[in-house]
Amino acid sequence: MQSAPSLPSALAAIAAGRDHIQTAEFARATNRAAQTIRKNYCLTGQCYGIRPIKFGNRLQWPVADVAALLTCGL
């Protein structure tokens, strides 16, 4: 059984206990522009292997997947 990756401290501060973060927060956590995140999503339906959920007209990115990206890499 694979254990869940621990949250990097910067991501924990951004997420503030939430399970999903918005695109701008995901961009800040990965040190990318928010438009880069949106473009990757529009072209492939994902960004760095992470698929968001849509809530209204906003994309919500799972914090656990972002933590795995930041700790384990691409």
Image (spheres, grey):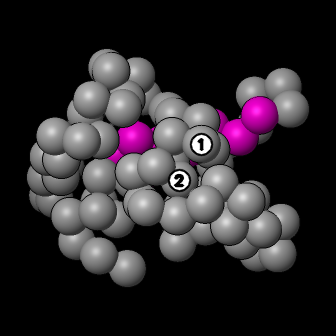
**What is the crowding at mark 2: few (fewer than 14 residues within 10 Å), some, or many (at least 20)?**
some
User: Measured from the top left, where is residue 36 in percent x and y?
Assistant: 68, 67
Residue that badge 1 annotates: 24
* 59 is within the stretch colored magenta: yes
Secondary structure mostly seen in magenta is strand
Q: Answer yes or no: do the residues labelled 2 and 1 have beta carbons within 8 Å? A: yes
Residue 43 sits above or below residue 46 on the image: below
| Side (left or right) of 51 relative to 9 | right
Q: Which mark is residue 38?
A: none
Q: How many marks?
A: 2
Residue 43 sits above or below residue 18 on the image: below
Q: What kind of element bears circle 1?
A: helix
Residue 55 sits above or below residue 6 on the image: above
Q: Quadrant of the C terminus?
A: bottom left
**What is the crowding at mark 1: few (fewer than 14 residues within 10 Å), some, or many (at least 20)?**
some
User: Measured from the top left, where is residue 18 in percent x and y?
Assistant: 40, 22
| Side (left or right) of 39 relative to 48 | right
The residue stretch that appears in magenta: 58-65
Q: Residue furthest top?
A: 17
Q: What kind of element bears circle 2?
A: helix
Q: Amino acid at mark 2?
A: Ala
Question: Which is nearer the eye, 60 or 29?
Answer: 29
User: Measured from the top left, where is residue 52 in percent x and y?
Assistant: 64, 48
Q: Quadrant of the N terminus?
A: bottom left
Can I make out residue 7 in this image? Answer: no
Residue that badge 2 annotates: 27
Can I make out residue 43 in this image? Answer: yes
